[in-house]
């Protein structure tokens, strides 16, 4: 497993993976953890390039091979998350229904919260059934930023 760090508008991302795919993309809160890395490992170059393009606004669909570790149920939830289109949102209830049982809503929410691959598996696109902003492991302020970044409607401020 190799790793690198990437500076983004939302802070530093830790990216880990190998020839089998990306296994972790997460925000690093402790800036001291992000050591200077001179060269990006070859197994992570595509991920770094695509994430940079995402933040530049030139990419809205990732084509990176993923290899997250989790239970079979978590992987089913993460697959549902990966199918949420760019610029769209869904609810935990809808995810549970897509899995075939509305009663698994809490388990689906828990799996969503354990998503190890931020941004590419877009758990930030899940909101409450009442359109409320719900939790995000990277922080609600990052979730709001990501949703605004992906929004097809751009709003300008006057001041």
Image: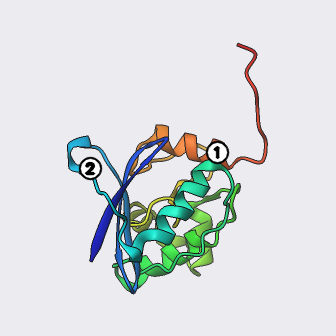
Task: Please report the residue visible at 68 percent of the width from the left and 60 percent of the height from the top.
Answer: 86
Q: Which residue is mark 1?
A: 149
Q: Quadrant of the N terminus?
A: bottom left
Q: Is residue 40 left or right of residue 33?
A: right
Task: Please report the residue visible at 53 percent of the width from the left and 75 percent of the height from the top.
Answer: 64
Q: Secondary structure at mark 1?
A: helix
Q: Is residue 159 above or below residue 79?
A: above
Q: Secondary structure at mark 2?
A: loop
Mark closer to the chain start, 1 or 2 = 2
Q: Nearer the viewer, residue 66 or 122?
A: 66
Residue 122 in view of the camera:
no
Residue 89 in view of the camera:
yes
Asked which quadrant contains residue 88, the reply is bottom right
Q: Nearer the viewer, residue 2 or 148?
A: 2
Q: Nearer the viewer, residue 158 or 33?
A: 33
Task: Please report the residue visible at 59 percent of the width from the left and 81 percent of the height from the top.
Answer: 100
Image x and y of residue 159, in percent? 70, 13
Task: Please report the residue visible at 57 percent of the width from the left and 79 percent of the height from the top.
Answer: 99
Q: Which residue is mark 2?
A: 34
Image x and y of residue 9, in percent? 49, 41
């Amino acid at each position: 497993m190799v790793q690198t760090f990437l500076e983004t508008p939302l802070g530093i991302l830790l990216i880990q993976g190998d020839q089998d795919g990306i296994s972790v993309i997460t925000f690093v809160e402790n800036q001291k953890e992000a050591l200077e890395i001179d060269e990006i490992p070859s197994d992570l170059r595509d991920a770094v390039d695509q994430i940079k393009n995402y933040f530049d606004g030139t990419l809205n669909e990732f084509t990176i091979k993923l290899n997250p570790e989790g239970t079979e149920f978590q992987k089913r939830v993460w697959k549902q998350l990966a199918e949420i289109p760019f610029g769209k949102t869904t609810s935990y209830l809808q995810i549970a229904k897509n899995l075939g049982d509305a009663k698994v809503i809490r388990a689906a929410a828990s799996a969503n919260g354990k998503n190890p691959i931020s941004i590419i598996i877009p758990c930030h696109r899940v909101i409450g059934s009442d359109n409320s902003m719900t939790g995000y492991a990277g922080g609600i302020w990052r979730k709001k930023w990501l949703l605004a970044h992906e929004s097809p409607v751009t709003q300008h401020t006057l001041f």
